[in-house]
């Protein structure tokens, strides 16, 4: 791996884990089926109990973990996200492979077209050869004299 700033190869890579505490809310399904009517009823009819429950109940929270690769250049102390660079490299590899496949397909099409042209040329040669043979046969038949019935013998 190479540093994008100083082009040095003295780079260390590490995985960084981040944990974050976020509030967990109700989902769309709960709000669509229950929440749209329960929350207004709760606050209209059970205000006192709802306030007590709001103060006492524990918060609904969950931990969200994120991990990513980070590279640090040992020469210039530049830090960058390796995942982004890997994604770019993998995209370049994918594009190169795609181009190779395109070239192979082009070559196959070219060969198929060439073989088609060759077959067509051999058929054309066979047709002209057959026409020449027919013309020779006809000329030979025309040169044979008629028999006593006024017909030419079939060759």
Image (tube, rainbow, N blue to C red):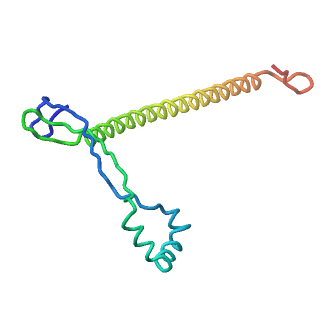
Q: Name which residue lies at 52% across and 32% down.
A: 112
**In the image as oriented, which residue stretches furthest toward the bottom?**
44
Q: 93 or 79: nearer the eye?
A: 79
Q: Quadrant of the C terminus?
A: top right
Q: 58 or 125: nearer the eye?
A: 58
148 displayed left or right of 23: right
Residue 93 pos. (x, y %): 33, 35
108 displayed left or right of 140: left
Q: Note whether 2 is above or below 79 in the view shown.
A: above
Q: Note whether 120 is above or below 153 in the view shown.
A: below
Q: Note whether 134 is above or below 31 in the view shown.
A: above
77 displayed left or right of 46: left
Residue 100 falls in image quadrant: top left
Residue 88 pos. (x, y %): 28, 41
**In the image as oriented, which residue stretches furthest toward the top?**
155
Residue 65 pos. (x, y %): 33, 45
Q: Quadrant of the N terminus?
A: top left
Residue 124 pos. (x, y %): 60, 31
């Amino acid at each position: 791996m190479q540093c994008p700033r100083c082009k040095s190869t003295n780079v260390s890579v590490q995985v960084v884990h981040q944990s974050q505490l976020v509030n967990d809310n109700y989902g769309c399904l709960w709000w669509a089926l229950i929440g749209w009517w329960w929350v207004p009823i709760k606050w209209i009819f059970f205000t006192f109990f709802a306030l007590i429950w709001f103060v006492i109940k524990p918060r609904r929270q969950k931990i969200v973990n994120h991990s990513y690769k980070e590279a640090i250049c040992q020469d210039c102390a530049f830090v960058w996200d390796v995942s982004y660079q890997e994604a770019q490299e993998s995209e370049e590899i994918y594009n190169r492979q795609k181009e190779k496949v395109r070239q192979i397909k082009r070559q196959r099409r070219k060969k198929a077209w060439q073989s088609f042209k060759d077959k067509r040329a051999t058929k054309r040669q066979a047709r002209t050869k057959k026409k020449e043979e027919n013309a020779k046969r006809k000329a030979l038949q025309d040169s044979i004299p008629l028999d006593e019935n006024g017909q030419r013998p079939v060759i």
